[in-house]
Amino acid sequence: MTDEFDTEIYYDDDADSSHIEDETVAVLGYGSQGHAHAQNLADSGVDVVVGLREDSSSREAAEADGLRVATPVEAASEASVVSVLVPDTVQPAVYADIEDELEAGDTLQFAHGFNVHYGQIEPSADVDVTMIAPKSPGHLVRRNYESGEGTPGLLAVYQDATGDAKQQALAYAEAIGCTRAGVVETTFREETETDLFGEQAVLCGGVTELIKAGYETLVDAGYSPEMAYFECLNEMKLIVDLMYEGGMGAMWDSVSDTAEYGGLTRGEAVVDETARENMEAVLEQVQNGEFAREWIAENQAGRPSYRQRRIAEKNHDIEDVGERLRDLFAWAEETDDESTENDS
Ligand code: NAD
Ligand code: MG
Ligand code: MG
Ligand code: MG
Ligand code: MG
């Protein structure tokens, strides 16, 4: 995937809407991804039925958005394409309920490969199993569709029972706006393992630990928590924005020569060979299924460790300092994300 010439990227011209326009798509779940897929599909002219439990608080929202709502079982029974957009941790239970509604030639569609890749959902051999995973939270998938921009996404085919799996997935991607921006082909294994590794080692886990370690180092050395907060957390966004827009080069060009020299010589002393070995160990636990088994067991036990760690993280000094400073200064933007506990 590192060589751009090895990576297939699909755009609107590669998708043929005839592979989805006569199908009924059941969208199970009306959360971050579900509400966006359902509305975008419907606006693209696809027949959509949203599958939600009788007591689901999302029913009202889906109906207010002009969509037809049924139970997951009814929706799956009626549909030829079932898009599984309930949280990853509840997908196996929801799948067990709807499994019998899948007929030969139907499509089971995912936005993340966890359950199929780790064997928590084992679809029968006569259905297509595909993935269209937008690389962005659902509210942006919806907003980008409405503005005409589109959202980049990933496509994968796990099982092609009909011979039409990839063409239908591309048509689905077009209908939710992903082929406008570009869709990269991958596999369930690659999507799942890179997603888990990235969020654990670099994005969610790596970044927060780097920030806390820097903050604690400064505060332990006697500097003020406010200064430590600004240097280690607040400025992170400015640096990441520069890299997002123009790569590392744009960031290095934009900081002072002193920052550039200091960063280039000292960064690798912090994220050193030991840190790389630790990353390899994290990747291995993703690859050999150890992380998946732990997380599944944690959920079965009612999430005791997850809850305890969430509380500890909330109680870190940096959170109090940040809350105070964000109230005092006008630079903090409204947060855009609605979700708290989710599985993205
Ligand atoms: P979510 O948590 O936002 O919403 C899930 C919805 O499912 C809820 O709103 C509710 O309508 C329904 N639901 C919740 N619990 C349920 C239960 N016990 N039984 C039946 N229905 C229930 O989920 P999400 O973040 O949209 O994730 C859906 C899928 O999309 C996951 O596979 C996730 O990995 C993937 N994904 C998410 C993102 C993201 O940014 N959120 C990005 C790419 C892929
Ligand atoms: Mg078809
Ligand atoms: Mg059916
Ligand atoms: Mg500085
Ligand atoms: Mg993820």
Image (cartoon, grey):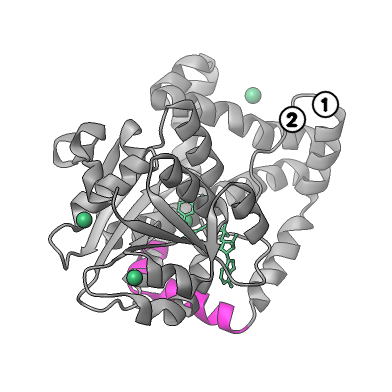
Q: Is residue 165 left or right of residue 306?
A: left
**Span colored in magenta:** 282-301
Look at the image and say whether residue 107 sits in the magenta stretch.
no
Residue at position x 60%, y 33% from top? 236
The residue pinned by badge 1 equals 329
Ligand 4 lies under 8 Å from the Cβ of mark 2: no
Quarter of the image where ligand 3 sits? bottom left
Give the amino acid at mark 1: Phe
Rendered image quadrant of residue 302? bottom right
Residue 234 spot, x, y in % from top left: 68, 33
The residue pinned by badge 2 equals 332
> In 3D space, how far apart are the residues under numbered discs 2 and 1 (Cα atoms)?
7 Å
Q: How many other residues sit within 10 Å of disc 1, few (<14), some (14-19) or many (≥20)?
A: few
Q: Answer above or below: position of 217 versus 48.
A: above
Q: Secondary structure at mark 1?
A: loop
Verify CB contact (< 8 Å) between mark 2 and mark 1: yes
